[in-house]
Amino acid sequence: MQYLWRTPGSRTTPEEASPISPSPLVIRDLTVAYHRKPVLWNVDYVAPPGGLIAVVGPNGAGKSTLIKACLGLVPKVSGSVEAFGRPIDKQRRLIGYVPQRESVDWDFPVSALDVVAMGRYGKIGWFRPVSRAHKEAALHALERVGMADFAKRQIGQLSGGQQQRVFLARALAQEAQLYFMDEPFAGVDAATERAVLHVLRDLDAAGRTVICVHHDLQTVADYFDHVLLMNTRVVAHGTVSRTLTPELLARTYGGQPVPFTEAAR
Amino acid sequence: MIPAIMDEAWRILTFQAGFNSAVVVAGTAALGLAGGTVGTFLLLRRRALVSDALSHATLPGIAIAFLIGAALGLPGRSLPLLLAGAVASGVLGLLTIQALVRHTRLTEDAAIGAVLSVFFGLGIVLLSLIQNLELGGQAGLKTFILGQTAAMAQGEAVGIGLLAAAAAAAVALLFKELRVLAFDPGFAAVQGWPVARLDLLLMGLAALVTVIGLQTVGLILVVALLIVPPAAARFWTDRLSTLTVVAALIGALSGWLGATLSALLPKLPAGAVIVLVAGAIFLVSFLFAPARGLVAVALRQARLRLDFAERRALSVLLGGGSVKGMLGAWLGLRGFVRTGTLTERGREAARAAERNRRLWDRFLTDYPTLIPAHVNWGVDPIDDVLPVDMVRMLEERGAS
């Protein structure tokens, strides 16, 4: 059970140490470098089954890179990632993904419904067009984020928050077991924040696991059950109540002022 | 003279000017169709310039293939051999770009520029060498640079037609896969689509169009058949399926008209004529397309500004002020003003504008978070945008 080995200094709550069923996500000894400069260093992590997990750390801590490395979108220097007991690239059907909104060209000639229907492509398979049943599933996903009225609209005509909800709906349409979300709360309006939160709670209630890069320390405790504190390496992880302590936050943010205190002024 | 040319043009356009010219026109139209179809996805995947490098990189391959053919003693120039050479060196150019981007810190545009110019330079040098060797058949090699529709034989035109149909069919079959690849390759990869191989396939289709277009349009300008039709089509639509079809039609139209023109004016290089026709269609689209064209956008902007100016002027008049100049004249034309005072219609319009402004104000104050959900808030009449009960609520609040 090599993955139960921890980097020195990381803390584990006892109930996580021996997962009963295969954990939704097991990261072992993951190191990623851009041009010889490590961005992730020896990351080991075992996600608890079910639950909402926030990945928290300062800018440049490698939070997005962690998600992308898990998904195979950036090359690894070393390490392995397993989902539900098998290598993650053998479990594509079980994985949902919400990338950062800025990662695509929103002038692209597709409607909101077209984008959400992309979540179904994995189920549709090669060559076949999107059938009516899959379009309905996509429309249902749009309804869940309160965007059904905008299904036919070209995505460039949506506000930033609405675009974020379209991405969320696309992930819902994937009907996955394990979701990776890259800053779904970044720069959104209040209505979108509520919609995203609503979806997160739904997924949690349905027993799904959501791993979510989150930048706002103020809301971590309200939105998430678990937290993974990181700064290039894993500093600590566990339940929010045990892990989000001033001492561990100070270690995560190093010499930088902790935005927690700044935000709570 | 002029009627004679018009008559000739009509006969070529309608495939009545003899079998050979009909074949050339049909072949070139098929090429344009394939270019528009494949080009749509190249453009959206931001690979347009890579395909330019690809086409320029074919030249050394053509020259080397010619030399090999001469060394083997093949009679004249063998087209399949030349095209095989073109594909080989074009692909080599592509791989060089990929290697440069992956293994060095060069950005893609620098890699494209370097590969394009070096390969093309090598090709030119080889061509000059061949000319000095005084082998037979080298005169035809230059047509690969600028293109010549007249050089198209019947069998070649049929070949072009088949290959173009295959390229268009491949895009139709892989429409969904190419859409997700072009929009969000990261998401496509997470879903398990082989992104690298799909990219390779797309570049393969671009290479196919390039190679079958070499003779007709020439390697310098063949990229225009991939870029210009979809770029022009983008002004007409916001739907990918429509965009692909319109781009294919614009490509086919360019090929058809261009080949006809170049048959009428045999001294001009065919490739340039075809590309200029495509360019003319682009210009018309850019200026006059109703969805995103320059004139339509400018008109909508002007209309919006006039709307606001008119509302402001009406409210000034309602408050007992006066409006002079162009705007006063405009209000007169609209029947809102006569001899400096509001008419009954004007008074009505002014009250409606006042109410609209007041209610939008109220909405903005009470529901600031709902604003982004309404794209035309504040501009369109509030009754057209918001539900009836919401408007009634705002009215009641505004009164209190």
Image (cartoon, grey):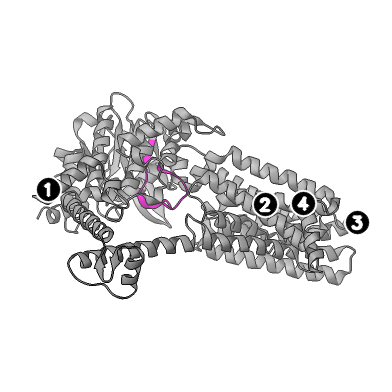
Q: Nearer the viewer, mark 4 or mark 2?
A: 4
- What separation in Å lies between label 1 and label 3 (alpha carbons)? 94 Å
Does residue A104 show up magenta in the picture? yes
- What separation in Å lies between label 2 and label 3 (alpha carbons)? 38 Å
> The disc numbered 3 marks a residue on which chain?
B
Q: Position of residue B381 (x, y in %)?
A: 29, 52
Q: Position of residue B350 (x, y in %)?
A: 24, 60
What amino acid type should be assigned to the residue bearing mark 3? Gly
Q: Nearer the viewer, mark 1 or mark 3?
A: 1
Q: Disc 4 designates what residue?
A: B14
Q: Secondary structure at mark 1?
A: helix
Look at the numbered discs 1 and 3 and tell me whether their residues touch, using CB distance below 8 Å: no
Q: Disc 2 designates what residue?
A: B252
Mark 1 or mark 2: which comes first in sequence?
A: 2
Whether discs 4 and 2 lie on one chain: the answer is: yes
Look at the numbered discs 2 and 3 and tell me whether their residues touch, using CB distance below 8 Å: no
Q: Which residues are magenta?
A: A96-112
Q: Nearer the viewer, residue B259 or A52?
A: B259
Mark 4 or mark 2: which comes first in sequence?
A: 4
Q: Disc 3 designates what residue?
A: B73
Position of A37 with respect to B271 (left or right) is left
Q: Nearer the viewer, residue B82 or B236?
A: B236
The dot on residue B397 is 1
- What separation in Å lies between label 1 and label 2 (alpha carbons)? 60 Å
- What separation in Å lies between label 4 and label 3 (alpha carbons)? 42 Å
Does residue A71 show up magenta in the picture? no
> In terms of image quadrants, where is residue A59?
bottom left
